[in-house]
Each structure stands twice: as structure tokens, then as C-alpha cells.
Image: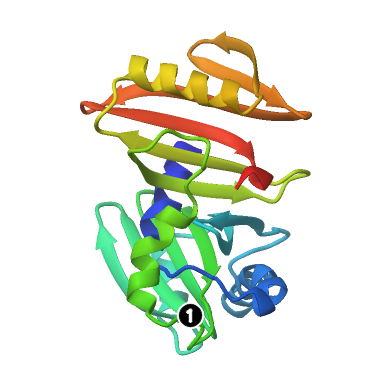
Amino acid sequence: MQVLFVKIVFVFTSLLWCGDMAAANAAENAPVASLRNVCRQLKLCVNLSPVSFRLFGMPSAFMVLNLQEPPGQVMQRLHGTSSPFSRFTRVGNQVFYSGSFGQTSLQLVVDVLQADTTHALLSATTLPPAGTGSNPAIDSMHLPGRRMLQLLPDGARLLMDVCYSDRERTCHQVYAYAGLSTEQLASALKATLIAANWQAQSIAAGLATWIRHGRTLQYFLANVNGKTTLYLTAPAILW
């Protein structure tokens, strides 16, 4: 799952914030519809359903493909005239394809390590309609700030933001703090959560669990390359 998150973040970090509320419902379903179109068009998927999620607030979906055919045969279809993928680049044992269906951006990561089978990650995200933002470049730069959890102490840099459409939409975020040690951040988080009427439940194997009004917030801290890193999971309603 960690590798899956890294791939998804890699292919989507340059995409824009989807802020058009009038088109929100249509945008939510567009990635799933686009992935199904790609599967049907290129004969990539059999009896698979896309998984919906949001990345930095943008409607997205992905599918993990395990194909019983060589990578070369699969990629031959990707280069055909009916393929929606117009660009590709190889990095090590993976080939990254990108393309679009209307306002939905498509990405496909193909592993070419195996000779007879192909493993791939197909994903999509919906871009905002043209003209919805006054300055898309600035909006893109401000994107992480819009998704910062207000409960957190100042000084955080948002590195990852993924929300899954489960029973109560759950979000997973990763933050980096350059100016606070793990002990300082733990103390600041404790004070902030207590002030917001959260109740500490347990701390096991570094994972802290807090509850409020029947909702659960969990996090753990680690020092990564000299920076304090915070992994957080909580209901999307907190944002």
C-alpha cells in the first residue's frame, strides 16, 4: 500500500485544485467513468471496479491491474491509434503513460520487470473546467494550504493527502515539520487536541488514538532525514 501511495502522489502532484462547486457531483463520478472507458477501449480490465478517492481534494480513482500477458503486448495497445495516452517515459523497470478524457487526466504505470505477466496502476483525476480560477498557477501553489488540518500546530508542510470514500470518508495525510522535534510536536498536539475537547484513548507502538463525538483521530510521529514527520488519519468532516 505504501508503494501504491507513492505512485499515486508521483503522478498527480502537478494537477490543479478542483474548486467548482456547481460541477462537484459530476466531477466526483468522472474519474470512475473515464477508467471504465479506458478499460473497455483498450481491453485492460476484466471484472474490476475502480476505487474512488480524493487526492489533495480532487476527485480521483484508481485500479490495480494484473494482466496475464507480456508487458510488450500490453504497451503495443497503448501506442495504438485508439489509445487515450499521448505521452510516456520510462524510469527503471516502470513506464509512465499520461493522457486525458475531456477534463479528466489519466495516468498508467506499467511494471515491465516480468516477462509473461504485466502489473499496472491505472488512475484518473478530474481537472476544473476552464475559467473557474482567476489564476490556475497561483491556485495550484496554494493547493496544500487549503487541505491543512486546522487542529495542527503551525509550521507544517503537507506532503500527502488521500481521502477514501468509505462509510465515513477517511483521510490520510503526511506532514513534515522542520522546526519541531518529535517530542515538541507530540506535546503541542496533545495541548491542541485537549483544548478542542478530544480525549486520549491509547498510545500503542507509537500510534496515538483520540476520540470526540464518536469520531476517531489517529497519528504517529517519526524523524525522517532530520525532519519530524506526522502521519495522520481522521474523518474528512474535520476539514
Secondary structure state at the residue bearing disc 1: strand
Location of residue 79 with respect to 117 vertically, above or below: below
Most extreme residue toward the front is 195
- The residue lying at 77 percent from left, 30 percent from top is 213
Q: Would residue 89 appear left or right of 27 to someone viewing this image?
A: left
Q: Nearer the viewer, residue 121 or 238?
A: 238
- The residue lying at 52 percent from left, 78 percent from top is 128
Most extreme residue toward the left is 226
Classify 10 Å Cα crowding around label 1: few (below 14), some (14-19), many (20 and above). Answer: some
Count of numbered badges drawn on the protein: 1
Q: Nearer the viewer, residue 159 or 1?
A: 159
| Position of residue 208 measured from the top left corner of the image (x, y, whole percent) | 55, 18
Label 1 sits on residue: 100
Q: On the image, which quarter does residue 212 sit in?
A: top right
The reply to whether residue 67 is in sight is no
Q: Nearer the viewer, residue 37 or 29?
A: 29
Q: Nearer the viewer, residue 48 or 10?
A: 10
The figure's colour scheme reads: rainbow
Q: Would residue 182 appear left or right of 165 to someone viewing this image?
A: left
| Position of residue 114 measured from the top left corner of the image (x, y, whole percent) | 39, 49
- The residue lying at 56 percent from left, 11 percent from top is 203
Q: On the image, which quarter does residue 168 sit in?
A: top right
The reply to whether residue 144 is in sight is yes
Amino acid type, mark 1: Ser
| Position of residue 57 measured from the top left corner of the image (x, y, whole percent) | 55, 59
